[in-house]
Image (cartoon, helix red, strand yellow):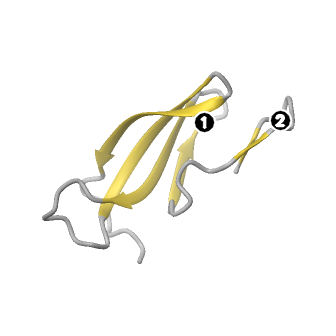
Amino acid sequence: MIVNTKTGRIQDSPEPGAFGLEYRLNSLLLVVNTVGRFTAADPPSGVPIAKYYVWRNSRLELIDTRLITGSRAAPR
């Protein structure tokens, strides 16, 4: 969940299965670490990916998705 401390409004998480979030209090960017599949060759359980969201017009907008390289395996 994301809570706007000025208005008290609550926003649902963009990725319920996320295993990590990266953010800074003075930034509009939210990085969500989760799992996904880019190609049919990826394992059914998925590969670690980072989804980049920006806060615009009182909602999160997905702006990019990238494979997380050189990381430990995502939790199962």
* Residue 4 pos. (x, y %): 78, 35
In the rendered image, the residue lying farthest to the bottom is 76
From the viewer's perspective, tell me whether residue 10 is left or right of residue 18.
right
Q: Quadrant of the C terminus?
A: bottom left
What residue is disc 2 on? 5
In the rendered image, the residue lying farthest to the top is 57
In the rendered image, the residue lying farthest to the left is 41
What residue is disc 1 on? 24
* Residue 44 pos. (x, y %): 26, 72
Q: CA distance from mark 1 to mark 2?
A: 14 Å
Question: With respect to residue 18, does 60 lie above or below?
Answer: above
Question: With respect to residue 34, does 7 lie above or below?
Answer: above
Disc 1 marks which amino acid?
A: Arg
- Helix, strand or loop at mark 2: loop
Question: With respect to residue 68, does 26 lie above or below?
Answer: above
Question: With respect to residue 53, does 51 lie above or below?
Answer: below
Disc 2 marks which amino acid?
A: Thr
* Residue in front for this viewpoint, 57 or 6: 57
At 62% from the left edge and 50% from the top edge, which residue is drawn?
13
At 86% from the left edge and 37% from the top edge, which residue is drawn?
8
- Helix, strand or loop at mark 1: loop
Q: Choose top left, top right, bottom left or bottom right for residue 6.
A: top right
At 30% from the left edge and 52% from the top edge, which residue is drawn?
68
